[in-house]
């Protein structure tokens, strides 16, 4: 009993020494980090940009943030920085976002950004509005001149309209005779076409039934593949979390600083947008007054133009009537020839329909064969899903042990073995999916 107690004491002391040594190593790693301060200068068109949001990230984490002052300057302090690659991003609602590629930050260094505008300032809005008002006034004068011209044009059209009325009646009679002949030939072609359409409908039904079988199998394969891809992504994410737990690594998260900087930048940008909105409102009021004067002149121009157009259209209508009667006569003669052509085409289509019926039957038989083959694949899939379920249970047990933080070395080895089982199961799944895809491709 005494010897056992001495051995246990020695073992406890050894564990204490090892733990102390491990703690010393962590302290050495932390001492490599340092606090740094950098300056960001932001301008556009030679002027400082106030209220720009500056965000500094390392990988997917934010390590520092701030907003620019009246001089377009933001000073950002990073309390813990280990010379890792970082990216600087500057954004503002009135300018295009700009990023610096990944760089190693230097303490005390100033970084300069020149933004491009994506929205107009109050001064630009006012200037553009004045130009629009000038152009509207010029159009008002032109509208008044056009009104006089349109009134004279209307008088001329009235005189020309009567000449176009005379020939329409004669053409109408000739057209009616040609239409009668075409109708007789059209009816003969329709009877033949009806028989062909009936056969085609039957063929189409056979093809649709075969396609439904193929589509159902293709949809099921796609859904199963998507589900397994999502499961694989979930396993990968869980594996990453476990790796972090096993290595006990940490990163600096400056989320609170970033949120504060976002709020400050948003407030400053809101004020600038308000100024731009007020300038835009005044500009619109000036434009509205000019538009009202322009609309008054345009109304007068429109009335005169409508009168001239009305008389012009009346003339065109009479001319078109004569032209249409002539065209209708020619069209009726053409339809008679087309009816004869359609009758011949219907006979040709009847032969093609017989050929399509044979092909539809073959397609249906192939679809039935595919259905049987996919059913066998489903049985194989069921077996793989059962294996996957067992591995998930094993993974859950292992995750519970990892969370406790004990014997991590052995747990890491167990995780590697379990990952290997998952990998082999993924290979089996990939082979089965290839079989399904080949079967679908062959059936199509």
Image: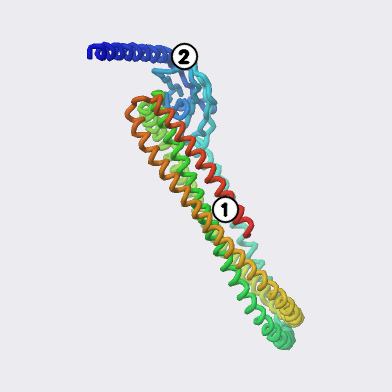
Screen quadrant of the C terminus? bottom right
56 or 250: nearer the viewer: 250
Q: Residue 14, percent across and down?
A: 33, 12
Q: In percent of the image, x 52 and y 60: which residue is there?
A: 216
Q: Position of residue 415 (x, y in %)?
A: 43, 32
From this viewpoint, which residue is outermost toward the left? 1
- Tell me where residue 239 appears, x and y as whole percent: 44, 33
Residue at mark 2? 107
Please indicate whether residue 205 sits to the left or right of residue 69 in the image: right
Task: Say left or right for 157 vs 280.
Answer: right
Point out the frontmost of discs 1 and 2. Answer: 1
> Which residue is found at the position 50% from the left and 33% from the top?
95
Q: In the image, 437: left or right of 229? A: right
Q: Which residue is mark 1?
A: 436
Instruction: State whether residue 267 is above or below residue 287.
Output: above
Q: 395 or 356: nearer the eye?
A: 395
CB under 8 Å between discs 1 and 2: no
Give the spatial CA distance, label 1 vs label 2. 59 Å
Q: Is residue 127 visible?
A: yes
Disc 2: CA contacts within 10 A as few (<14), some (14-19) or many (>=20): some
- Crowd tier of the residue under label 1, counting other residues whose Cα lies within 10 Å: few below 14, some 14–19, many 20 or above: many
**Residue 83 position (above or below residue 371):** above
> SS at mark 1?
helix
For the point 59% across and 57% down, the residue is 144
């Amino acid at each position: 009993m005494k010897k056992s107690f001495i051995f246990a004491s020695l073992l406890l002391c050894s564990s204490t020494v090892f733990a102390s040594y491990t703690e010393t190593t962590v302290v050495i790693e932390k001492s490599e980090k340092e606090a740094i301060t950098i300056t960001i200068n932001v301008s556009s068109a030679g002027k400082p940009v106030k209220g720009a949001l500056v965000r500094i990230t390392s990988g997917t984490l934010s390590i520092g943030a701030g907003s620019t002052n009246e001089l377009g300057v933001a000073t950002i302090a990073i309390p813990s920085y280990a010379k890792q690659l970082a990216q600087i991003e500057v954004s503002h609602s009135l300018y295009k976002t700009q990023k610096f590629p990944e760089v190693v930050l230097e303490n005390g260094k100033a970084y300069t950004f020149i933004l491009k505008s994506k929205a107009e300032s109050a001064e630009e809005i006012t200037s553009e509005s004045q130009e629009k008002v000038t152009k509207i006034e010029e159009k008002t004068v032109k509208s008044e001149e056009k009104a006089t011209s349109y009134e004279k044009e209307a008088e001329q059209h009235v005189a020309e309209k009567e000449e176009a009325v005379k020939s329409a009646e004669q053409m109408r009679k000739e057209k009616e005779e040609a239409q009668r002949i075409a109708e007789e030939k059209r009816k003969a072609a329709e009877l033949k076409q009806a028989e062909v359409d009936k056969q085609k409908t039957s063929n189409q039904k056979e093809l649709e039934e075969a396609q439904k079988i193929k589509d159902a199998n293709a949809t099921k394969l796609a859904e199963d593949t998507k589900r397994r891809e999502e499961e694989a992504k979930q396993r990968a994410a869980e594996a990453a979390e476990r790796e972090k737990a096993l290595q006990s690594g940490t990163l600096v998260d400056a989320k609170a600083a970033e949120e504060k900087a976002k709020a400050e930048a948003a407030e400053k940008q809101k004020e600038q947008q308000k100024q731009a909105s007020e300038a835009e409102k005044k500009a619109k009021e000036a434009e509205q007054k000019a538009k009202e004067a322009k609309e008054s002149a345009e109304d007068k121009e429109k009335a005169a133009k409508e009168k001239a157009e009305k008389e012009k259209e009346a003339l065109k209508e009479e001319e078109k009537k004569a032209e249409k009667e002539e065209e209708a006569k020619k069209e009726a003669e053409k339809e008679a020839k087309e009816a004869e052509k359609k009758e011949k085409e219907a006979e040709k289509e009847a032969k093609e329909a017989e050929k399509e019926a044979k092909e539809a039957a073959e397609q249906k038989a192939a679809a039935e064969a595919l259905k049987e083959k996919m059913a066998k694949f489903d049985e194989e899939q069921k077996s793989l899903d059962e294996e996957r379920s067992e591995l998930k249970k094993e993974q859950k047990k292992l995750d519970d042990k990892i969370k406790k933080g004990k014997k991590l070395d052995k747990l890491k080895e167990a995780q590697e073995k379990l990952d290997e089982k998952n990998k082999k199961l993924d290979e089996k799944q990939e082979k089965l999916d290839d079989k399904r895809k080949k079967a679908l491709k062959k059936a199509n």
